[in-house]
Amino acid sequence: MAIQILDMRMSEHISIATDDGEEINNGSVLFVGDIGIQTLAVVGTPNQSDVRVWLSGTVTVHRPGGINSPPPNVELFITRNGDGTPTSGTQIYHMTFNSGTVNVTVSPISITACDFPSVSIVAAGQIRYTLFITSASPPGTGDLFLFGPVAFNGIACAGSN
Amino acid sequence: MCQGAIGSSNRPLYANPLTLQRLFLAEWDKPRREFIHAEYVVYQKGVHRLTIQFLDVRLSEHMSRVVVPPIAIDKDKALFIGDLGVQTLPVVGTANQANVRVWLSGVVNIVRPADVMGLTPSLRLFIMRNGDGTPASGTMIYEMFYRLGTLQFTSSPISITASDFPSSSIVSQGQIRYSLFIIAFTLDEVSGLYVQGPVAFNGMAVAGSN
């Protein structure tokens, strides 16, 4: 069945870099992106089994100066069809970032994820994707901050010629 | 309409000055009408002008998450980490065949452990068009170097954005293959760099203009 574009959705958590940012630590998981991609156009057609979703985003983090602790891993993950909490849904993507042994950095972290949802998932007419960020640092360490910008977008396409 | 009027008359052709005049006008008008008609036909067939068309989105997900242990990047052997075929069939034989653009995008996550070897190696990422899955085949359309310097203990997602404007003859095949490779560029035996994952490589094709 011919190629169909289904939907494009965006989630812009922070559009302008913030002054101080929010600390990223292992005490909590920050909810930084959330989109619902609609698949209704293919439900009940042969293309229902041939849907692909491209997820893309950039998250900018800041590591201040005067920090002597080893840099913690930043953990980013995407869940599918969760309820907005990090342990719900199915984790479809997991990435780590580590700026290494340098201080005073601002790092835009790019993510590109793919999903090939099953027929039963597509049947619901909409697929929810949620992006979370956390780190290995204990709360209050002050070695990592979510600065922004943060954006998380998705495109869905189906079929083949 | 004029000819119908003439044909239905028993009078000799051109006898009536009015018929003559109408015929003259019709003949005078004919090239313009035919031209307009031709333009219309050409427009309808899409040879003259086409609007923007969405063609395809393809994804290649080599790794969806961080893998343990990570995969060493050697200087002698390129790793094949992305492969997709973007379809162009709807524009083949139309004016938009000459106006296809392909956006390629991906992220490759690299790890460099704390026990650094290989000093300051470079990484070379490249995209081949219409190769056979080996790094020396096809046409190189994108090449990027990445260096971490002397930094250690890093996990670095490398972002790739490439553009391709394939020629009419390439588009005519109905599908264009793009393959992504990564190799180390170092003087030392080992690069000390690893593909940690995730690795994703996607492409989107659009044609035409309004």
Image: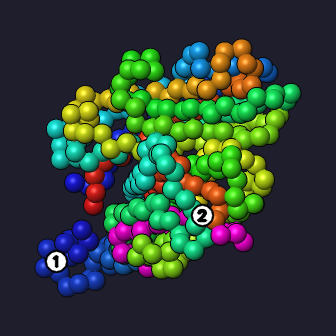
Q: From what the image shows, is residue A38 above or below residue A49?
A: above
Say the numbered circle drawn on residue B164: none
| Residue bearing the label numbered 2 | B125
Q: Quick check: A104 left or right of B111? A: right
Could you tell which of marks 1 and 2 lies nearer the N-terminus? 1
- On the image, the x and y values in percent for residue B4 come to 19, 72
Give how far across and how far down residue A29 sits, in percent: 55, 20
Start and end of the magenta stretch?
B165-189
Residue that label 1 marks: B7
Q: Residue at x 70, y 62 (%)?
A: B118
* Crowd class of label 1 (few under 14; some 14 to 19; many from 20; radius 10 Å): few
In this view, B51 is above or below B169: above
User: x, y (%) of residue B15?
Assistant: 26, 83
Nearer the observer, disc 1 or disc 2? 2
**Helix, strand or loop under label 2:** strand
Q: Nearer the viewer, residue B58 or B55?
A: B58
Q: Residue lying farthest right?
A: A66
Badge 2 sits on which subunit?
Answer: B
Q: Amino acid at mark 2?
A: Leu
